[in-house]
């Protein structure tokens, strides 16, 4: 039972990192990305490759994963600078679909559907961490660091500039803000921090393949942010915990056939998203209630 | 020969893409509602047809049930989800998320009722015949192209020649203008949902006999519709139609060069390129900003 | 008096209700596709494993009741790893049943690291033979199937040029490699091969390409719903060539598809008419319980489950604790096992050998045309 709980703690921490980093661009910069799983995946693949071929220390895998995600995120920054709203959602969708194809086809690096097997456990100062209860320490520290970083950024002048751009791009530009620079930086930071989640995921699961990094994952993370509360500190974490606990909660319902658990979970979070948007578009934590 | 065959296959696929995409484009273009559950409409129509036709009720009741289901779903969604949201908030993203949620729920409800497996409607019409040596075309391919041509022709007439159609086109530019003509913008928006949802029905029915159905098929339908709408240019029905045909053709002809797992990537590479280089699309008038 | 009976009945009902989850002394795990497009296989696999559990418990083979903790793999690697993590860390099983090539490869690392036995009775990717000491196969792998199918297609039917449609995953890749080496050996030629993504549903374009190759036969290497769609769309789009495939096609939905008529399909040969007690009991009770004839998949998961019963009973007789290590040592120390289909021995790589049957689908049933033995 203990291991079960720690296992959940690890998964919640990893997805909370994703939700917090997505919230950073969605909530504060108004960049609604449906491609967050791309950076989660790239981080995981790079970390797995580095751990297998270079060194499994997280002080090697994490920086490598973050650097590559930051570089790739420029592809997402490109449409973010050109278009807004529906167009950007569509562009990020396009990037997500393209990335899934590349993840499936670049077999020498990603193993395709077969995935990457036998990824070594995370190495922290020479100690191999793979038991769920030990890994929980690593994942929770990582989550706290990411939350701390994002909070500091949001409350800095950078964060104020971001919000100014979200509310009115032209006004921010007329105040002499370097709009393209600030937008690009926010996307890069978000992607690099999301890669941390990927790296942790790869070493914790010891196996990764493209199925974990599809559009469904991007949607799930987006749902976490929205259900929790876009643009709030606690929202994404609450959302992540809620959606990760949902399947376990449903599986306690005895009379339900095992085969319907997955479907029921999806129905609950689908309808949950819809109802929240109608009655409380600010999310569970958000202050914005429907009038 | 292979190129001709693939072009014909692509036209068949493209014709169906065009129909579904025009439905989405009509709704999105006139009401600005990011109706992501359009894929769910497709799934509902397809499974209703499969169920009614499969239990032996025949073709006409099947088509009627599918149309009724699609139109009702569109209307109910507009009434119960979009209207309340738009009353207190205009953000496209709120509407999009709500619509997305409905799509997920519908996909899984259908899966629970009809099973998550593959089902198809069996008909001799899906069997291809050789029209010229080495080129096979099934009767359904002709039906698909004919349906598309007829329905899009009718839609054109409706939008250009009727009072409601003109109002529908005006709605996108200026809802107030619609009001000054003594029409209710809400009613006009509902009309857009009725027409747009009904347009997916032929595609849903033909798909149920050619490639077969599963509950997740709505996802692909939606992505293609969105891609065609943007590539064609938001607000342009003929642009969407053209883009739907082009995407179908590109997907099929791509097989001459790449393996089939790259075909979806081809579609979205085109979309990505359009957004960056020409966000207004093939025939679009509205700027992206 | 009636009241007493009512209370006793209620009590008994309670006991029965809570038993499977909590009271079993012997719990083994299973990672089967219970949802998703491959769920149809899950039912087939469970029919075999559940019957074996019934038999083991009815015979009191073990010191306490046995149960299987099923986890849903969806037939996909990622959910399988999550399920396996739960089985290993939470349920704490020493022995798991596995299925599907991708799933089996993905969980093999966890099995090895935690010394938990994983037994595959459904996946047929040839590289499943090399997943380490803790990974066993009670099913002949697809390299044997290809080796049986190719000579039949080339020599007996005279179909020299074969085109391949394969799903782009470890199983499809493995079958492609196998065909590439086997076709020239038999004097035939693999004229072209077309990969399709696991999620694809549209095959009219691929069908056109297959037709353009002018191949005498098409080998379809996919599974689940996709293989049905491929076969249907090949026929719909004017491909008249002979279609051949491997054991993954032996599911009721596929055999019943009108387009399947005349297909060549291979699979492990199980002689259900054997007179040995294990086979007789299996065949009789299977028909009684499920009201249909058993298939090779039913046999494999019955055997995989029974194998645990045999090994665990032997360990209990020795007074040894039942762990993955002990089960592995016991299997190595045991020369042969009486399972359904006869007395069999494991090869050193942990794989059982069975003869392969070449069958043709006629009127919704697969009828054997020839059988090939490997030794």
Image (spheres, rainbow, N blue to C red):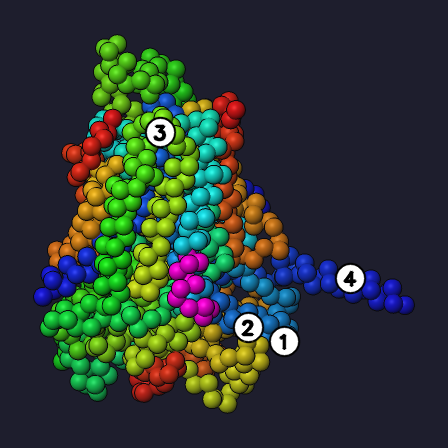
Chain of the residue that carries numbered disc 2 in the rendered image: C
Chain of the residue that carries numbered disc 4 in the rendered image: C
SS category of the residue bearing label 2 = helix
Residue beneath the point at 42% across and 82% down: C270
- Label 2: few (<14), some (14–19) or many (≥20) C-alpha neighbours in 10 Å: many
Locate residue B65, reporting x and y percent: 44, 58
The reply to the same-chain question for discs 1 and 2 is yes
The image quadrant where one finds the C terminus of chain C is bottom left
Q: Distance between the Cα atoms at labels 2 and 3?
A: 76 Å
Q: Quick check: A113 above or below C212? A: above
Q: Which residue is mark 2?
A: C52
Chain of the residue that carries numbered disc 1 in the rendered image: C
Q: Give the prevailing secondary structure in the magenta stretch.
A: helix
Locate residue C44, reporting x and y percent: 47, 70
Asked whether the beta carbons under mark 4 and mark 2 sit within 8 Å of each other, the answer is no
Q: Which residue is mark 1?
A: C59
With B217 as the anchor, is C156 left or right in this view?
left
Locate residue C322, reporting x and y percent: 55, 62
The residue nearer to you, when weighing A151 against B192, is B192
Span highlighted in magenta in the image: B55-66
Which of the two discs, 1 and 2, labels the residue nearer the N terminus?
2
The reply to the same-chain question for discs 3 and 4 is no
Q: Which residue is mark 4?
A: C10
SS category of the residue bearing label 4 = helix
Asked whether the beta carbons under mark 3 and mark 4 sit within 8 Å of each other, the answer is no
- Let me know if residue C148 is in the magenta part: no
Q: Quick check: A268 above or below B208? A: above
The image quadrant where one finds the N terminus of chain C is bottom right
């Amino acid at each position: 039972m203990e291991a079960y709980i720690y296992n959940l703690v690890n998964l919640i921490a990893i997805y909370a990192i994703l939700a917090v980093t997505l919230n950073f661009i969605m909530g504060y910069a108004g960049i609604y990305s449906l491609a967050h799983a791309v950076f989660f995946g790239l981080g995981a693949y790079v970390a797995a490759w580095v751990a297998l071929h270079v060194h499994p220390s997280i002080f090697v895998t994490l920086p490598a994963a973050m650097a590559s995600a930051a570089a790739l995120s420029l592809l997402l920054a490109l449409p973010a600078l050109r278009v807004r709203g529906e167009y950007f959602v569509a562009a990020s969708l396009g990037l997500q679909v393209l990335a899934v194809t590349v993840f499936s086809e670049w077999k020498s690096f990603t193993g395709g559907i077969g995935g990457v097997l036998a990824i070594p456990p995370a190495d922290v100062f020479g100690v191999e961490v793979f038991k769920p209860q030990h890994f929980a320490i690593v994942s929770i520290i990582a989550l706290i660091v990411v939350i701390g970083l994002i909070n500091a950024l949001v409350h800095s002048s950078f964060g104020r500039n971001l919000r100014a751009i979200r509310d009115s791009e032209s006004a921010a530009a007329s105040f002499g803000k370097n709009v393209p620079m600030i937008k690009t930086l926010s996307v890069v930071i978000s992607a690099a921090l999301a890669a941390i989640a990927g790296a942790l995921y790869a070493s914790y699961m010891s196996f990764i393949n493209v199925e974990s990094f599809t559009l469904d994952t991007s949607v799930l993370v987006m749902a976490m942010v929205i259900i929790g509360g876009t643009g709030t500190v606690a929202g994404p974490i609450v959302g992540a915990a809620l959606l990760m606990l949902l399947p376990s909660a449903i599986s306690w319902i005895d009379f339900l056939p095992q085969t319907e658990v997955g479907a029921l979970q999806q129905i609950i979070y689908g309808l949950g998203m819809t109802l929240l948007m109608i009655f409380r578009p600010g999310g569970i934590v958000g202050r914005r209630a429907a009038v | 020969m292979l190129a001709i065959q693939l072009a014909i296959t692509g036209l068949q696929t493209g014709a169906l893409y065009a129909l579904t995409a025009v439905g989405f484009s009509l709704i999105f273009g006139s009401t600005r509602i990011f109706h992501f559950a359009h894929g769910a409409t497709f799934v509902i129509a397809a499974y209703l047809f499969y169920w009614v036709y499969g239990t032996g009720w025949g073709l006409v009741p099947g088509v009627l049930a599918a149309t009724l289901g699609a139109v009702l779903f569109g209307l109910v969604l507009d009434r119960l989800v979009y209207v309340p949201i738009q009353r207190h908030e205009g953000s496209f993203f709120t509407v999009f998320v709500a619509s997305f949620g409905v799509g997920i729920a519908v996909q899984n409800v259908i899966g629970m009722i009809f099973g998550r497996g593959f089902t198809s409607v069996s008909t001799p019409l899906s069997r291809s015949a050789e029209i010229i040596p080495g080129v096979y075309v099934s009767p359904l391919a002709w039906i698909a192209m004919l349906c598309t041509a007829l329905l899009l022709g009718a839609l054109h007439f409706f939008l250009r020649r009727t009072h409601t159609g003109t109002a529908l086109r005006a709605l996108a530019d200026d809802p107030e203008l619609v009001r000054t003509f003594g029409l209710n913008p809400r009613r006009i928006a509902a009309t857009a949902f009725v027409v747009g949802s009904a347009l997916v029905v032929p595609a849903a029915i033909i798909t149920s006999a050619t490639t077969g159905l599963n509950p997740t098929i709505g996802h692909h339908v939606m992505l293609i519709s969105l891609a065609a709408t943007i590539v064609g240019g938001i607000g342009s029905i003929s642009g969407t139609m053209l883009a739907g045909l082009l995407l179908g053709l590109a997907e099929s002809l791509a097989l001459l060069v790449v393996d089939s797992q790259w075909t979806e990537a081809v579609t979205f590479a085109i979309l990505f390129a359009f957004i960056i280089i020409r966000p207004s699309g093939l025939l679009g008038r509205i700027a992206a900003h | 008096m009636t009241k007493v009976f009512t209370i006793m009945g209620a009590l008994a009902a309670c006991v029965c209700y809570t038993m499977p989850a909590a009271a079993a002394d012997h719990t083994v795990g299973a990672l089967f596709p219970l949802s998703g497009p491959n769920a149809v296989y899950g039912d087939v696999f469970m029919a075999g494993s559940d019957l074996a559990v019934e038999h083991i418990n009815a015979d009191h083979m073990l010191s306490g009741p046995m149960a299987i903790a099923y986890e849903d793999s969806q037939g996909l690697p990622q959910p399988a790893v999550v399920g396996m993590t739960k089985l290993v860390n939470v349920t704490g099983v020493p022995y798991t049943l596995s299925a599907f090539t991708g799933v089996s490869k993905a969980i093999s690392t966890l099995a090895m690291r935690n010394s938990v036995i994983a037994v595959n009775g459904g996946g047929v990717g040839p590289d499943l033979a090399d997943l380490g000491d803790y990974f066993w196969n009670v099913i002949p792998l697809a390299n044997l199937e290809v080796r049986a199918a190719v000579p039949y297609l080339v020599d007996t039917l005279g179909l020299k040029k074969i085109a391949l449609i394969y799903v782009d995953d470890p199983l499809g890749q493995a079958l492609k490699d196998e065909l590439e080496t086997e076709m020239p050996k038999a004097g035939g030629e693999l004229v072209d091969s077309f990969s399709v993504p696991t999620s694809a549903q549209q095959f009219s374009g691929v069908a056109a390409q297959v037709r353009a190759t002018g191949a005498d036969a098409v080998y379809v290497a996919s599974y689940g719903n996709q293989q049905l769609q491929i076969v249907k769309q090949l026929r719909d789009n004017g491909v008249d060539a002979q279609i051949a495939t491997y054991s993954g096609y032996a599911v009721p939905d596929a055999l019943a598809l009108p387009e399947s008529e005349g297909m060549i399909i291979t699979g492990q040969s199980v002689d259900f008419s054997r007179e040995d007690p294990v086979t007789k009991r299996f065949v009789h009770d299977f028909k009684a319980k499920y009201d249909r004839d058993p298939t090779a998949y039913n046999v494999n998961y019955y055997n995989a489950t029974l194998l645990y019963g045999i090994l665990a009973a032997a360990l209990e007789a020795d007074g040894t604790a039942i762990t993955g290590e002990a089960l592995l040592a016991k299997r190595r120390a045991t020369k042969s096992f009486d399972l359904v289909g006869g007395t069999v021995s494991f090869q050193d790589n942990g794989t059982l050998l069975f003869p392969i049957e070449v069958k043709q689908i006629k009127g919704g049933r697969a009828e054997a045309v020839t059988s090939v033995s490997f030794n």
